[in-house]
Image (spheres, rainbow, N blue to C red):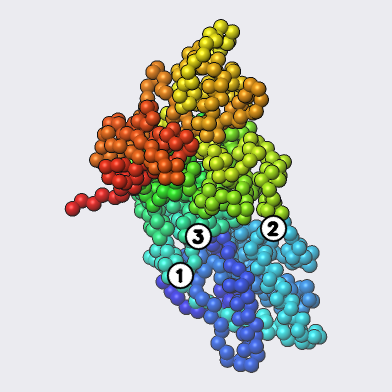
């Protein structure tokens, strides 16, 4: 290794080409940090040289050069190990000043002096780079060549006016050209300009100095390149990875340029250099990709500081034949990653999944997605993606921790790589087996508890609220456009009207999506006016069937409806199907026995109405006479009258639209999930399970079989009672329920949060017990 200072004339004065390896990064220097300070240094040195003939050259830093074997007839060349940004900038500076001199009519001797520092004179060499003092990376060669070979004023004007190019090198050229012209304009008259040009050329040739470190054949250029980066040279891990790969390829006898053109060139775009946010940090997109790619390949988490070290270990035993294969693999996975981050799926459902994933801001799932998208076609991975989305969205809405997602995704990745079963089965089984708070899959009941009771407007980001409402809208109106990013979130009942407490106003049932905000005047408008404005813009989906009167009770009823649509859009694998026993052929009431019957229990009537409407599409209209004439699991033919039906409708919380006609007419609006639970099970359908959390409370001894539950309504002076069965079922009002909320809803006659039941034995609510069950356990 030999290190000593060289002036610009000593570096560029002889016929020699300094070749920048194609695997080094493109030109990245910028005006404020690099070009402007360099020009200011040059201008200062002109003044200093004019005042002091013995002034020392200005030090610009160091460059590291390595030897290159030269064939006979080729121009002498050296490889640039470090310092390509400095060397390239100096060449552009020299060319820009040269062309400014041409434009201003400066004598040719000064122009030729600068031209000799930018072009070699060896006309016998056959190398394509023989004309150039510096030969940059492949990305920069086009604009660099155009700058260096410009001779005529027409060519100079084209460089200055080319609006189609986004080359940073051209930006640098234009900056130095402009500064050189401004500097020359300070000198009036040909004699003054001649003297100024002479001073500037002298500084550019002899007033700037670099320390040139020439490596010997025994020095390891790769180690030096990496150590320079460790000492502060602003190279990214992906720059080091690129350098390592192509150094390996070259050492094995591969043609680096061929490999670059085949596999790496797409990764040189500005999009890959742009920064993206990961957690609390910003990283280049290419660095982020390599971290996810290595995590997927190695099956362990790769942290940013160790990215290059891990990649170097990964390639330590790479054979010659594997280098092109690895580069091809990197290109393939980078294309997948690009589609993931830009939400470009192979189907509309896949695109929707990716756009929702960007809202969730959960990048830890990316290694799993890279594996799925590479290993399975779209139709085989579709249901697997739906499972992942349901798990993520349900946990997001429930505001459950994501701190353990890294470990879980690595475990899932290992399973997917080992399993021979379909990915959907592996993902389903793995996520369903998670019982800890950091990983369990919230059930329908748990999610509905959140959506009916929690002020999500204050708890979730606006983007996530749009995601939730958009999903509900898609379940209610599947044919409508799924994109929601441009829609405005709006209250139905305006908060400033104070018609309901904030904890009700901020729940899901009082929120909607509109093409734009209603405006300030609508904030004080009546519900009738607001309803009219809303229906004018979006009459379907989450805004369909808005009632004429809207208050706390209607908000709760709408929350039930939207919670049910949420569970349809993001279903849980263990959601219990609603058994339907309405026959395909409807009997007519012509043979009804018209006798006087005692009025049956109203709860049974409500359940009968639910079952009759159960298999019918939304929008079905039946009269009370028609409903009474149809059989169900509760009533046979002739056992029910129309007035019985009408008296039992008060126990249906927002499920039907009652139209005051004679006879009374009822329209199906939606199926409330909490109402479904009150239907009796069809003996032909095997019940899958009772509430999972209740079973956990029983297994941990927090609950005991036959524990009595109470729920008090002091204002009504009412006490409701229920009992816990050994299998987790809740027995209330003479009926069995698989949901605590369904049991309480049945008891109080309105939608209610079943986790507010109090256990008489412990005087704790079920919610308190659930928290105890989920708390971490420590061994003594």
CA distance separating discs 2 and 3? 28 Å
Q: Residue at x 61, y 33 (%)?
A: 477
The numbered mark at residue 10 is none
**Residue 648 in view:** yes
Q: Earlier in the sequence, mark 3 or mark 1?
A: 1
89 shown above or below 764: below
Quadrant of res 14: bottom right
CA distance separating discs 2 and 1? 31 Å
CA distance separating discs 3 and 1? 18 Å
Q: Residue at x 63, y 38 (%)?
A: 547
**Residue at which label 1 appears:** 232
Q: Which SS class for mark 1?
A: loop
30 shown above or below 406: below
* Percent x, y of residue 241: 45, 56
**Residue at which label 2 appears:** 165
**Residue at which label 3 appears:** 282
* Percent x, y of residue 677: 44, 30
**Residue 569 in view:** no
């Amino acid at each position: 290794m030999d290190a000593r200072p060289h002036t610009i004339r000593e570096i560029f004065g002889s016929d020699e080409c300094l070749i920048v390896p194609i695997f080094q990064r493109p030109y990245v220097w910028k005006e404020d940090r690099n070009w402007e300070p360099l020009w200011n240094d040059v201008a200062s040195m002109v003044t200093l040289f004019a005042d002091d003939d013995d002034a020392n050259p200005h030090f610009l830093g160091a460059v590291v050069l390595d030897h290159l074997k030269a064939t006979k007839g080729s121009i002498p060349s050296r490889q640039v190990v470090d310092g390509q940004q400095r060397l390239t900038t100096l060449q552009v500076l020299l060319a820009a000043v040269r062309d400014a001199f041409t434009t201003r009519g400066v004598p040719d001797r000064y122009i030729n002096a600068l031209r000799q520092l930018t072009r070699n004179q060896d006309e016998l060499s056959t190398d394509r780079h023989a004309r150039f003092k510096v030969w940059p990376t492949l990305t920069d060669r086009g604009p660099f060549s155009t700058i260096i070979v410009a001779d005529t004023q027409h060519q100079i004007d084209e460089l200055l006016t080319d609006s189609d190019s986004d080359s940073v090198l051209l930006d640098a050229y234009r900056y130095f050209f402009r500064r050189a012209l401004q500097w020359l304009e300070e000198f009036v008259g040909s004699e003054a300009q001649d003297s100024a040009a002479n001073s500037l050329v002298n500084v550019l040739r002899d007033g700037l100095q670099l320390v040139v470190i020439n490596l010997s054949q025994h020095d390891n250029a790769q180690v030096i390149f990496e150590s320079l980066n460790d000492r502060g040279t602003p190279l990214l891990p992906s720059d080091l990875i690129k350098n390592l790969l192509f150094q390996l390829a070259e050492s094995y006898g591969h043609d680096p340029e061929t490999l670059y053109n085949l596999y790496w060139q797409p990764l040189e775009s500005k999009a890959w250099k742009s920064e993206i946010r990961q957690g609390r940090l910003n990283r280049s997109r290419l660095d982020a990709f390599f971290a996810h790619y290595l995590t997927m390949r190695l099956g362990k988490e790769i942290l940013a500081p160790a990215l290059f070290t891990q990649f170097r270990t990964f390639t330590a035993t790479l054979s010659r034949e594997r280098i092109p294969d690895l580069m091809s693999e990197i290109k393939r996975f980078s294309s997948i990653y690009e589609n993931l981050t830009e939400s470009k799926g192979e189907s509309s459902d896949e695109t929707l999944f990716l756009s929702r994933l960007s809202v969730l801001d959960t990048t830890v799932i990316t290694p799993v997605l890279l594996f799925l998208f590479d290993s399975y076609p779209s139709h085989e991975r579709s249901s697997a993606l739906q499972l992942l989305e349901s798990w993520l969205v349900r946990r997001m809405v429930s505001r459950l921790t994501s701190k353990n997602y890294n470990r879980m995704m690595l475990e899932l990745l290992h399973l997917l790589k080992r399993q021979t079963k379909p990915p959907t089965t592996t993902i389903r089984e793995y996520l369903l087996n998670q019982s800890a708070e950091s990983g369990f899959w919230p059930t329908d009941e748990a999610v509905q508890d959140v959506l009916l009771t929690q002020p999500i407007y204050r708890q979730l980001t606006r983007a996530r609220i749009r995601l939730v409402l958009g999903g509900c809208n898609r379940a209610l109106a599947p044919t409508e456009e799924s994109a929601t990013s441009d829609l405005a979130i709006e209250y139905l009942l305006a908060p400033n009207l104070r018609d309901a407490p904030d904890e009700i106003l901020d729940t899901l049932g009082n929120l909607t999506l509109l093409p734009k905000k209603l405006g300030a005047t609508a904030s004080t408008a009546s519900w009738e006016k607001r309803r009219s404005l809303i229906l004018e813009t979006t009459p379907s989906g989450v805004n369909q069937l808005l009632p004429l009167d809207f208050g706390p009770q209607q908000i709760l009823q709408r929350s039930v409806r939207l919670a049910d649509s949420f569970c349809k859009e993001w279903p849980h694998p263990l959601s219990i199907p609603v058994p339907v026993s309405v026959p395909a052929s409807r009997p007519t009431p012509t043979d009804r026995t018209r006798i006087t019957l005692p009025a049956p229990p109203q709860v049974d009537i409500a359940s009968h109405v639910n079952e009759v409407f159960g298999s019918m599409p939304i929008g079905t209209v039946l009269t009370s006479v028609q409903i009474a004439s149809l059989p169900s699991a509760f009533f046979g033919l002739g056992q029910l009258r129309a007035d019985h039906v009408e008296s039992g409708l008060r126990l249906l919380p927002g499920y039907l639209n009652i139209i005051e006609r004679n006879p009374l007419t009822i329209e199906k609006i939606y199926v409330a999930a909490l109402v479904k639970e009150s239907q009796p099970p069809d003996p032909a359908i095997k019940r899958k399970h009772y509430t999972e959390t209740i079973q956990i409370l029983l297994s941990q001894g927090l609950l005991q079989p036959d524990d009595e539950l109470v729920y008090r309504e002091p204002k009504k002076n009412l006490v409701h009672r229920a009992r816990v069965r050994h299998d987790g079922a809740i027995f209330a009002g003479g009926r069995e329920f698989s949901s605590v909320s369904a049991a309480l809803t049945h008891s109080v006659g309105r939608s209610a949060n079943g986790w507010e039941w109090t256990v008489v034995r412990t005087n704790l609510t079920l919610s308190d017990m659930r928290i105890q069950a989920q708390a971490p356990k420590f061994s003594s």
